[in-house]
Amino acid sequence: MGSQWLFTLTYGALVTQLCKDYENDEDVNKQLDKMGYNIGVRLIEDFLARSNVGRCHDFRETADVIAKVAFKMYLGITPSITNWSPAGDEFSLILENNPLVDFVELPDNHSSLIYSNLLCGVLRGALEMVQMAVEAKFVQDTLKGDGVTEIRMRFIRRIEDNLPAGEE
Amino acid sequence: MAIFSVYVVNKAGGLIYQLDSYAPRAEAEKTFSYPLDLLLKLHDERVLVAFGQRDGIRVGHAVLAINGMDVNGKYTADGKEVLEYLGNPANYPVSIRFGRPRLTSNEKLMLASMFHSLFAIGSQLSPEQGSSGIEMLETDTFKLHCYQTLTGIKFVVLADPRQAGIDSLLRKIYEIYSDFALKNPFYSLEMPIRCELFDQNLKLALEVAEKAGTFGPGS
């Protein structure tokens, strides 16, 4: 897939440049999250305009839409949803393969780099625009030797200020 | 032109985009001799016809141009006060163009934020929770269609009452916004949209919608 290759390489170039600019992994992770956030707040409108999904009424619906519609639409993969917390406010997205890391190997001097942290920012930014404050973080990473890549999503709270009319 | 205007309102109720796409409304240009048989008055920085009606000039019409030169509010193109100018018999005969005053951009801003408030009131009045808010406002001369996205942006289209297909036009405008405004990295969210591509594609979409929609007789 021609454009997939370009996308993977572009992302790689972005991460390596950030590593040169910031010199420590924590700062790079923060920048990736920030950039992801800025992408997420715009991506959500494209997603809503094209996918026609309605408002999700609980976190389970949200999880379904994220895994089955959004990831499919933008990355061509469908992660599975597992490990629901008893209160229903946390779940895991298991990515069998992650298109961002197709040709990547993490060197030893970047062991705390969260290579795909952009994705966490995207999820956070997109959901914030539909009034959900969430935390997204990688808890397993194939780049670090784990069998799968796992993103843990946690619902923090509903964002009550500036609700669109009709959503109260 | 069956689609008259498009407004895009951001989450805070601010107008971020506006497009008028109708032909100029009825305007009448006539030559007058002193004394003017229409009574003019100053209102809101414009010179309006207060009394007197003839040849297509109606009460409420504003002075748009004098002797072919557009007026600037209550001043002529060369800075004189319109009422003073027209009170002086030496300036006659004079050719004056009257027409329905157009909304200024400030007025449009105010109307958009008022609509935003009305929209919120509409949702609160709803007997059930989760109301979609105002979807349509109907008058004898136009229908206002509104679509609020899940993120709180409103797309408003004013069209001929007989024009169909506005719902899908609203969705199309949402797509155009997500493409040409949001994907432009130099466009900041919630700010006025000044993107050429957005303009062009929106105008195209309006043309397509007008052709596809149903018109009444004689359009």
Image (cartoon, rainbow, N blue to C red):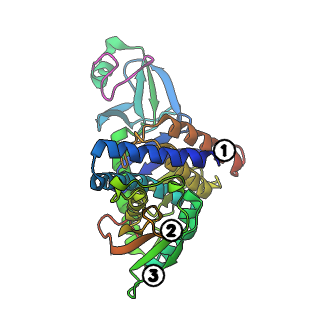
- How many marks do you count on the picture? 3
Q: Which residues are magenta?
A: B67-80
Query: What is the chain letter for disc 1?
Result: B
What label does residue A83 carry, if any?
3
Q: Is residue A50 visible?
A: no
Please identify the residue farthest to the front as the structure is shown.
A108
* Label 1, residues with CA under 10 Å away: few <14, some 14-19, many ≥20: few
Tags 2 and 3 on a common chain: yes
Q: Which residue is mark 1?
A: B208
> In this view of the protein, which residue sits in the foreground, B72 or A84?
A84
- Name the element at disc 2: helix
Residue B126 spot, x, y in % from top left: 43, 75
Q: Position of residue B24 (x, y in %)?
A: 53, 33
**Secondary structure beneath label 1:** helix
The chain under label 3 reads: A
Q: Chain of mark 2?
A: A
Q: Pick the quarter of the image with the C terminus of chain A.
A: bottom left
Do the residues marked 3 and 1 share a common chain?
no
Question: Is label 3 in a helix, a strand or a loop?
Answer: loop
Tell me if residue B74 is in the magenta stretch: yes
Amino acid on which the number 3 mark rests in the picture: Asn
Residue B23 x/y as whole percent: 56, 35
Specify the farthest residue to the top.
B90
Q: CA distance from mark 1 to mark 2?
A: 33 Å
